[in-house]
Image: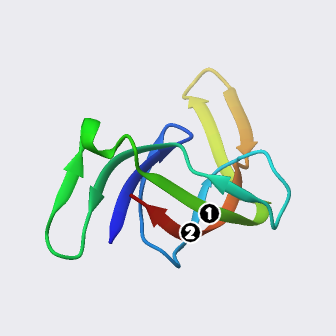
Amino acid sequence: MHAIVETGGKQFRVAPGDVVRVPKIEGDPGSEIALGKVLALFGDGGDMSIGDGATSVRVNATITAHDRGDKILVFKFKRKKQYKRTQGHRQDYTEVRIRDIVA
């Protein structure tokens, strides 16, 4: 059984036991959370629930760690104008372990 979950403006395919990096969620490592909106649920026998059929589904997870991603460099340049700008960015994320999917 797996589900499609939306959290932090992104969608993730999760199954029990998976470890997923999602955009930053408030909470301490080790705390239990219910992940955001469930968009779809796919069962083992080929049955699936999409949209309103998946609204009663909950995906329970445990926060395992908070960290920051690799640095991304943004470089702006205009030729012949001596214009150069460099900016770095590191995205915060939370690592969660999916405990179970409650339908």
Q: Is residue 67 left or right of residue 83?
A: right
User: From the viewer's perspective, is residue 95 above or below residue 86?
Assistant: below
Q: Residue at x 40, y 44 (%)?
A: 56
- The answer to whether residue 48 of the structure is visible from this angle is yes
Q: Which residue is mark 2?
A: 98
Residue 7: give x, y in percent of width and height. Answer: 53, 43
Residue at the extreme left: 46
- The answer to whether residue 70 of the structure is visible from this angle is no
Nearest the camera: 27 or 24?
27
Tell me which label, 2 or 1, sits earlier in the chain: 1
Q: Amino acid at mark 1?
A: Ala
Residue 66: give x, y in percent of width and height. Answer: 79, 60
Q: Residue at x 68, y 54 (%)?
A: 33
Locate residue 68: give its quadrant.
Answer: bottom right
Residue 84: give x, y in percent of width and height. Answer: 68, 31
User: From the viewer's perspective, is residue 1 above or below residue 68?
Assistant: below
Q: Say what secondary structure mark 1 lies in.
A: strand
Total numbered badges shown on the rendered structure: 2
User: From the viewer's perspective, is residue 44 above or below residue 96?
Assistant: below
Q: Which residue is mark 1?
A: 61
Residue at the extreme right: 28
Rate crowding at label 2 as few (under 14), some (14 to 19) or many (20 or more) other CA atoms within 10 Å. Answer: many
Locate residue 52: give its quadrant.
Answer: top left
Q: Are marks 2 and 1 in contact (CB under 8 Å)?
A: yes
Distance in Å between CA atoms under marks 2 and 1: 4 Å
Residue at the extreme top: 81
